[in-house]
Image: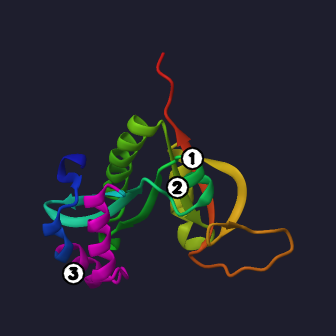
Amino acid sequence: MYNQIEVRRMTSKDIDTVYRVFAENNIGKSLEYISECWKQNETGERITLLAFYKEQFAGSLHLLFKSYYPFFLENGIPEVNDFNVIPILREKGIGSALMDAIEEIALKDFGIVGIGVGLYDSYGSAQRIYAKRGYIPDGRGVMYKEQPVSPGSQVLVDDDLNLYFTKQKQSEG
């Protein structure tokens, strides 16, 4: 199935396609956001990879060189960010192909990569995939809007409630 999947870096010509396909599939990404991501690709702040399945846009994944999560930022850990696969194309290996490609870049250049994952049931499959891929919790506990959640405090269970994980390059030999 991988031979039907192409992963490549985003170009400026992809902006409208990404916006249109995401909108058609109720993946809420504004044209301004997608354009800003492209600008950050040009300035070297992020890499955006796009996946195509049978030559149709199927998903995207970003690597932020400067994470918004303070621990990753302070330690120079790039962060896998904003991972989307078109719902009707899931379970075809597209997400794995994107993760393989972004990990290859991050681990080669940095030796480590980080990722944050939400904590409610919609993130269940992502939680399992990251564990199977060798990601381990960073040991700093649950974060809300990239800040630690203190015992006894109350936070919303939404997309900003995350647990962060890292994966290190396997030593050769």
102 displayed left or right of 16: right
**Image location (x, y in percent) of residue 167:** 54, 42
Look at mark 2 in the image and give the residue it sits on: 115
Q: Amino acid at mark 3?
A: Arg
Helix, strand, or loop for circle 2? strand
Q: Residue 135: in sight, yes or no?
A: no
Span of residues in magenta: 17-44
Q: Residue at x 36, y 57 (%)?
A: 46
Q: Which mark is residue 12?
A: none
Q: Secondary structure at mark 1?
A: strand
* Residues tagged 1 and 2 counted as in contact (Cβ below 8 A): yes
Between the C-alphas of marks 2 and 3, the distance is 27 Å
Residue to which mark 3 is pinned? 20
Q: Which residue does the image show at 35% across and 80% down from the upper left? A: 29
- Dot 3 falls on a residue whose secondary structure is helix
Q: CA distance from mark 1 to mark 3?
A: 32 Å
Disc 2 residue type?
A: Ile
Which image quadrant for residue 18?
Answer: bottom left
Spatial separation of the CA atoms under disc 1 and disc 2: 6 Å
